[in-house]
Amino acid sequence: MPDLFEDGEPLYWADNEDDVKVLGLYTTRALAEARIEHYRELPGFRESPGGFAVHPYPLDQRRWLRGFQAPPGS
C-alpha cells in the first residue's frame, strides 16, 4: 500500500524497507541535486547512493485543505 501525498498521489511504496527523509526544499533542481551529492557522502546515506529523488513541489499554495487523513489500510 503506498503512502500518499495530500492530493492522493503515491509518495513511495511501503514495504518495510523504505525510509523516506525530506532533506530540504530548494528553489531549483540544480540546488537540490548539489545537496544530494553532499548527502551521498554521509554515513547512513552513502550505503544507498541511488536512493535519492527530486520531486517538484508547488510553492505559495495552501495544502491539506480538508485536514489530515492516513492512507487507506494504515
Image: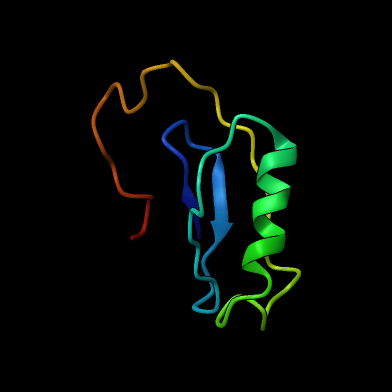
Q: In the image, residue 64 lies at what x, y percent?
A: 32, 28
User: Could you tell me residue 58's position as x and y percent?
Assistant: 54, 23
Q: State whether residue 59 is above or below residue 20.
A: above
* Residue depicted at x 57% and y 56%: 12
From the viewer's perspective, is 8 left or right of 50?
left
Q: Nearer the viewer, residue 22 or 27?
A: 27
Identify whether 48 is placed above or below 61: below
Left/right of residue 40 with respect to residue 17 in the rendered view:
right
Q: Is residue 33 visible?
A: yes
Q: Residue at x 49, y 78 (%)?
A: 16
Answer left or right for 2 relative to 72.
Answer: right
Q: Report the number of discs.
A: 0
Q: From this view, report whether residue 9 is shown above or below residue 23.
A: above
Q: Residue at x 69, y 67 (%)?
A: 51
Residue, x 62% and y 66% (percent of image)? 39
Q: Residue furthest left?
A: 67
What is the basis of the colouring in this image? rainbow
Image-based side of 59 in relation to 30, left or right: left
| Rendered-image quadrant of the C terminus | bottom left
Residue 33 against residue 40 in the figure, above or below: above
Q: Is residue 52 visible?
A: no
In the rendered image, residue 20, in percent from the top left (x then y), is placed at 50, 62
**Coordinates of residue 36 in the picture (x, y in percent):** 67, 58
State which quadrant residue 37 falls in. Answer: bottom right
Q: Quadrant of residue 13?
A: bottom right
